[in-house]
Image (spheres, coloured by chain):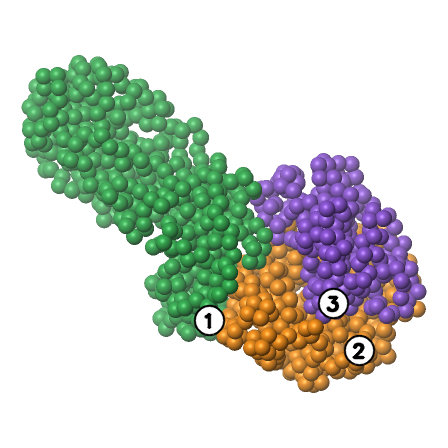
Chain colours: A orange, B green, C purple
Amino acid sequence: MAYPYVSDHEVRVLSKHFGDPQQRRIDTYVARGGYSSLKKAFEMGSEGVIDEVKASGLRGRGGAGFPTGVKWSFMPKDSGKPHYLLCNADESEPGTFKDRELMRWDPHQLIEGCLIGAYAIGAQHVYIYCRGEFFEVNQILARAVEDAYKQGYIGKDIMGSGNDLELTVHQGAGAYICGEETGLMNSLEGRRGEPRVKPPFPAAVGAFGMPSTINNVETLAAVTHIVGNGGEWYRQFGTEQSPGTKLFCVSGHVKKPGNYELPLGFPLMKLIEEVCGGMRNGNTLKAVIPGGSSVPIIDADEVARCSLDYEGCVEVGTMLGCASVIVMDETTDIVKQVRRMVDFYAHESCGQCTPCREGSAWTAKILRRIEEGRGTEEDLDVLMEMTQQMVGTTICVLSDSVAAPVQSSIMKFREEYLALIRRGERVGAA
Amino acid sequence: MAELVNLTIDGHEVSVPRGTTILEASKTLGTEVPHYCYHPGMSSPAMCRLCLVEVEGAPKPMPSCVTTVADGQVVRTQSEEAKKNRRGVLEFYLVNHPLDCPICDMSGECNLQDYVHAEGREHGRGREPKRVFGRDDFGGDVLFYGDRCVMCTRCVRFMSEVEQDHRLTVVERGNRSVIDTFFEEGLDGTHWHGNIVDICPVGALVSKDFLHKARAWDLTHTASICTSCSQGCNIELHTRDNLVQRIKPRENLDVNGWWICDHGRHDYEWMNRGGRVEAPLVQADGSSKAVGWTDALRGILAAAGSFGPGTVKAVASPGCSNEDLGALKGLVEALGGGDIVYRSARAAEEIPLKGFPQLARRKDLAANTTGAELIGIERAGADDARGGLDHIAGHDGIVLVLGDLLEDQAETFGSHAGLYVYIGTHESAATSAAHYVLPACTHAESEGTFTNRDGRVQRFEAALRPPGMARPAWLVLGALTSERSGSEVARSAADAFRALGDTVAAFRGIGYEDVGPRGAVVNEAVSLTGD
Amino acid sequence: MSDVPFRNPGWAGNTGDFDLSEEQVRGDDFVGERPRDGGHASGAGSMPYMLADKAPEAPLFEGAFQERFEKILTRYPTKQAALLPTLGLAQEIRGHVSPASMDRVAELLDLSPAYVRGVSTFYTMYNKRPVGRHLVQVCTNISCNLCGADEVVEAFLRYTDAELGETSKDGNFTVIEAECLAACGFPTCVQINSRYFENVTPDQVPAICEHLKAQGE
């Protein structure tokens, strides 16, 4: 039995046990070599762990792609204060569904990564901030943590190493913005999940005012394997600048949507055609959003040239983000889908910064009007200029995420907007 | 003194202490970077995004309210980039703003109006239906017009950080977010909430008391000092048609910061009270007769001539200025000496402003108790400012009353006096025996100083024209003294204050020029009993 | 593919062949019964569920719920940090977060009621008013939308004969649109109370609703 849609192209490191319900059980996990990386980490010392992660070249899997080892090295040494490691499990970027799978199939892989990370940065307490809607995942995770406590992998004097670590599963309550690291910290502290102004950065003033580091689920899960097998081993996958494997969440109009673990640098077209079995119903590819709804849309030509690593995506004018590949075929009504994405951002804007609070809702209203056939060509100019005003002017980048789909779609699918504005023609309208 | 940092703002070199924000550093050049959420008295969330400026080398425009200065930094607050940002942000503000300026109390002193006028787009591009929140009564003196709100959250932060009673919050999020209280709880029972109306940069929070009362541009602002307690908060009296329309705080970091309490804020109706004594009144043949000042003063001097030394008993209000009280003392001495008492009300509890610890509504409810004490006037009566005048009521020598309304005293007050002169604003039962009732100005009608509980001498200016022939008490009393003793007459409040310094050591050497806008502390350590 | 739509555990896309039971996929046989007292303290804060049975007037927090509340408090350096889990717990008991619940939670955590209102309205999972026995949240965000989520919403509204966001007359269903539920590979994803239904198509909707009504889940 295997997780469906296994492809020969896959390199299954993190997703090795997807589809195997036994993997959740701590006995199985330990029998398969689990928690040996944690033991090894304790032997390596915290500096050794950070060096190994630096050597692996692992980059944050939450979207920004910042080198994890470097991030960890920002944490103060001997600050005398409590340190916290926060695991960002608030997966809610449209198109992304990897962390949920990682947590529900292999919770201990994440827990082990969290403990290693906490040890490396001198944290005493790990909080896994798990998305509130993931009731089942939360319960699986809570059970796994409980098992790990009982078997002495969490708590006092872990495995006789003299190290004490606490881990708490924290359930979110429904806010996309809590996936932003400082928004998550505010939320964890029992506040509105509004992002904070930086500086100060979390490594100086983070959760509860203490030095903190925040890592994505996939990042910490990868750490388990990097520490277990070595940074060099990890570098055999992927590219020089984007080493390792990555879970690609493919959704939309492909025959076989799902999570595929591939080395970074994998060609996007090959992912669609070979790994995912091509377009559904033999349709034609129209556009792809390669990194979750916050990154610019690319058209079929750009898809053909795009390799799925951090640099390759930038080359075609988009971003890898969290590698959530949303595939659209020729039946897609771009205007409607862009409007839907902007509706999402308007709904999720925390409301602090004026450009985001007012701009996202305004953009949504204009797009809605265009979609309803009451748009004008001037609206497109207003949208382009006004969304540009939302780029780089706010505390966090949610505002920028509104501009990305709007601007890229108007630039690349202007004709579709114009057909709707001038002639009331909609793609896919029956 | 903190270490200085040198930087360039808009082409000008500036040196400011390390840790200063770019926004504050710009102020030293006279440049006010537009902003809403920033307020010097509270934390900065940097969320209005209006104060973004260009900093050389920074990848993005920086919020000047939280970005601190660095050596060699090159800042541009007026560059095309910075202006473009402000134009854009201001357009966002107007997308849902009702533009109801004609009926908005803030109109004329509104930061949204001013900023858009200065740097906004000529034509708005918003075509969509506007969001509507409507109006909400926040309790206390506050009405909330949600549609005008720019979501700067100053009011929320004032209540949580300064008053430290977290009654306000942002409800909902994103474009639906709005300021509110806990359902019907409101602001009732809080004592400093009037400040949220002041710090609201637009017309979202307005005062019920001031609602639709006057247009901002018709108001004349006069620097004054609050008379509600001994704290001596710096205020402005806003007047129109010779009436005080409202009181606003005036910044003085040594006294009240930016804040005043709600008691002081609403304590102005007495300044507008009618039924004033408008001319000197002389009692003759059982009825009083209005006379000119010359006749009145001559009459008093003539009547006062026949008393021996030490026969004056006087009562003065601690709401009178240092100048008035000093002049009274001068006259008492010129008339051969005697004693002066004051009566003042005391509240049971102090009402502190937790986030600004030096500020509280004090128990001592008079503005110039310290001044009175320093001048040598002693307290009499109870904590409700009644009683304590029995020794004066039946006195057979000279009785002088300055400012005290004598509301608790009977008609017989002063009826045995050889000479009873009442200097004040209103007649009452207890003035009926007065031989002379002289019309005096209130502090709102005259210039002068108060000495607050910390010994800080602070000036106030005349905001209203006095009614009829009313004159400042220091002038009237000074004229009598001068005639009696041949001393030089004080021709201005500044003279009167200087004269006070000649006789009272605490004030020696302090002139109006020393007092300035933030006050000057008297020469002696001040300790008040019962405060 | 299973012909019983509500048993679709949704981990495989709609054409996958797999031999796991629903329980195995969802982890039910692993986690077993959900402990009312929250189980181990480390997970107590992640336990609040959305249940069909709601008791809007029930006391907060007694018995096992009191235990869970106290466990939650032990996991954070500040009392305030317990706010989100505690509101969740209140909602598990009462079905929504009423002003009275906010007031009580504020009192328990030494916070102002206004503050608690501000926080609870920030998050979408706290129902500010009562909802039906089954809160049906249909993801209509891009990935599901591309695959026909709008039709799924319509199917639910048609079946329940209620407006979007309103509760059906029988009190069984409240249908709302949800933002991305992170099940984009299994469109359309529908969250009903605490569980996900994936690969939902419009024609499956009546069966799912009938099942829910029959189960009383």
The three-letter code of the residue at mark 2 reads Asn
For discs 1 and 3, the disc positioned in front in the rendered view: 3
Asked whether A373 or C75 is in front, the reply is A373
Question: Residue A354, relative to residue B445: is it above or below?
Answer: below
Identify the residue at image location x=46%, y=68%: B125
Q: What label does residue B55 carry, if any?
A: 1
Residue A296, visible in the rendered structure: no
Q: Do the residues labelled 2 and 1 touch (CB within 8 Å)?
A: no
Residue B520 picture location, percent across and down: 29, 45
Residue A92 picture location, percent across and down: 70, 63
The three-letter code of the residue at mark 3 reads Gly
Quick check: do tags 1 and 3 share a chain? no
Q: Is mark 2 on a helix, strand or loop?
A: helix
Q: Label 2, on which residue?
A: A281
The three-letter code of the residue at mark 1 reads Val
Q: What element carries label 3?
A: loop
Question: Residue A284, relative to residue A176: is it above or below?
Answer: below
Identify the residue at image location x=78%, y=68%: C185
The chain letter under disc 1 is: B
Q: What label does residue C148 carry, if any?
A: 3
Asked whether B417 or C117 is in front, the reply is C117
Residue A72 lies in what quarter of the image?
bottom right
Quick check: do tags 2 and 1 share a chain? no
Q: Are marks 2 and 3 in contact (CB under 8 Å)?
A: no
Mark 1 to mark 3 CA distance (whole Å): 48 Å
